[in-house]
Amino acid sequence: MELLGAAGAGHAHPEQSRDKDLRHLTPDQYLRYALNTYRVLLTRGTHTTRIHATDTDTQRFLDQLISPAPAD
């Protein structure tokens, strides 16, 4: 996983990035890059944007940041 959320903070792992051009970045550089990328992608939804993380700590981190959608 590229970005893990635990204990209320994000932890970047650029060495695990699928983009080989980003693997040389420091964790702090990669964290800024990844958070900006996710911010841009997540603000483009016009009606609904759903987010699911397979990592439990990351899902908890996202749940703290984002209000859950109302039930259908």
Image (cartoon, rainbow, N blue to C red):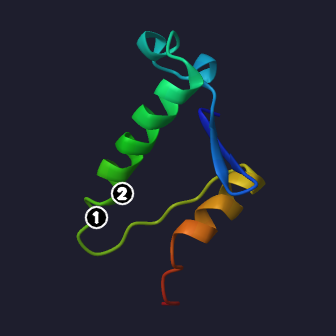
Q: Position of residue 40 (x, y in %)?
A: 30, 49
Q: Which mark is residue 36?
A: none
Q: Which mark is residue 42?
A: 2
Q: Is residue 38 above or below residue 59?
A: above
Q: According to the image, label 1 marks what residue?
A: 45
Q: Is residue 7 above or below residue 15?
A: below
**Residue in view at x 63 percent, y 53 percent:** 53
Q: Residues within 10 Å of mark 1 (few under 14, many from 20)?
A: few
Q: Quadrant of residue 47?
A: bottom left
Q: Position of residue 6 (x, y in %)?
A: 74, 51
Q: Is residue 27 above or below residue 41?
A: above
Question: Does the residue at mark 1 contact the one at mark 2 (Cβ under 8 Å)?
Answer: yes
Q: Secondary structure at mark 2?
A: helix
Q: Is residue 8 above or below residue 24?
A: below
Q: Amino acid at mark 1?
A: Gly
Q: Quadrant of residue 4?
A: top right
